[in-house]
Amino acid sequence: MATLKVGLVSPEREIWSGEAKQVVAQTIEGQLGILAGHAPVLGVLLDGSVVKIQPADGGDEVVAMVGSGFFSVADNEVAILAEQAELAGEIDVEAARLQLEQALAGDGDGMNDVSVTRRRAEARLRAAGHES
Amino acid sequence: MGAQLRQLRRQIRSVKSTAKITRAQELIATSRIVKAQENVRASRPYADQITRALSALISHRVGIGHPLLKEQPEDRRSAVLIITSDRGFAGGYNANVLREAESLVARLREQGREPIPYVIGNKGITWYRFRGREMAEQWSGFSDRPDFPSAERIGRRLAEDFLKTDEEGGVGEIHVVYTEFVSMLTQQVQVRRLLPLEVVEEAADEVLPTYDFEPSAEAALDLLLPNYIESRIFHMLLQSAASEHASRRRAMKSATDNANELIGLYSRQANQARQAEITQEISEIVGGANALAESSAGSD
């Protein structure tokens, strides 16, 4: 079966790369599942959403939180570029909870809208497997 | 002990401690260059991908009139973003950047534009403040290891000001003065225009696929352009950081070499002084003994 070559990158480093069976990303309009042979797409990621990658070797699903970014699909290559991207295992759940509380109380992080901060915190918790 | 000898020994001691400091700085800078180069490498996949996506987007829909791509001839103000370091001890690094910035400012004035400085790094900020010049914005605290959120902050501020008109305190174009890390030995000060973006038509050796856009091409461009600017700024910050370390390493290496040379010179002089002292003592003893022998021979 054909596989996808996937790269999940942030400006500071490559977060994950490898072969995958399926990638699920969320755009403003909804979830998008990508399998091998998908038509070329350039999509805007929902700021503060979760990306799921199923590795081709049958390993555990890779789950990551992404912030502002986009993904492109072409020739069975998927590139996911996000300014903020964290793998589930790297997420600081406590910090994310705190962030969420602050966002709900109406305090942003000084740079983004409160709604963006809230969505990002929620996405972090979701990616880490803690429903908010 | 002779006064001269004491003074020389004191000088040797002080030069030795200076050499220790510069040597330590040199070693620190050396290890940081490696780190900085790794950071540059790690940032490359993102930069390449975003450039590719952007050129795909623009080549498909030529003439999308995004405000960030538009020339603004009616705005006479030009932003000059100057990237300097937070700390000194880096040889000519900051001086070179500031000199290049000065000539850019002069050039802009000649064209009848009004340059507005935006300064990164304590050294540049102090330089401007000392001369009593106004800065539109200043950032510091991350020059030796830039992180992406800093680049994001800078990029947003610049894009925001770019979209304003002159009357609102905005600018019509944005130039950046930074230092490109060419190799360990060569770093070059570069002047680039960041905005409005010049879309360089890549040689068409690679046929870009016909993308569908989710949700639309306009939305994709709205997101991509600011992110691209932030990624460019991040790249410049990383290059500058690597150059800063390289230039600090070189400056500290020559300082250590000079100190060692001085220590050698002073040691030779100190040895000479010590020997002269001994010779003098001996001749005094011998002279004294002779005088004693003569006087006792005379009394016999």
Image (cartoon, rainbow, N blue to C red):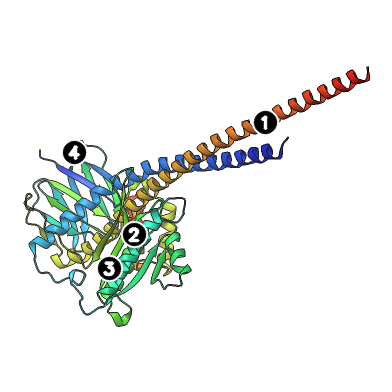
Residue contact between numbered discs 1 and 2, judged by CB atoms under 8 Å: no
Figure quadrant of residue A36: top left
Q: Position of residue A123 (x, y in %)?
A: 32, 56
Marks 4 and 1 sit apart, C-alpha to C-alpha, by 83 Å
> Which amino acid type is marked by label 1?
Ala
> Which amino acid type is marked by label 2?
Ala
Within 10 angstroms of label 4, few (less than 14), some, or many (20 or more) residues?
some
Q: Is disc 3 on the same chain as disc 4?
A: no
Residue reaching furthest right? B300
Within 10 angstroms of label 1, few (less than 14), some, or many (20 or more) residues?
few
Q: Along the polypeptide, which appears first: circle 1 or circle 2?
A: 2
Residue indicated by mark 1: B276
Marks 3 and 1 sit apart, C-alpha to C-alpha, by 67 Å
Residue indicated by mark 2: B151
Q: Position of residue B249 (x, y in %)?
A: 42, 44
Q: Is residue A46 visible?
A: no
Residue indicated by mark 3: B174
Residue indicated by mark 4: A56
> Which amino acid type is marked by label 3?
Ile
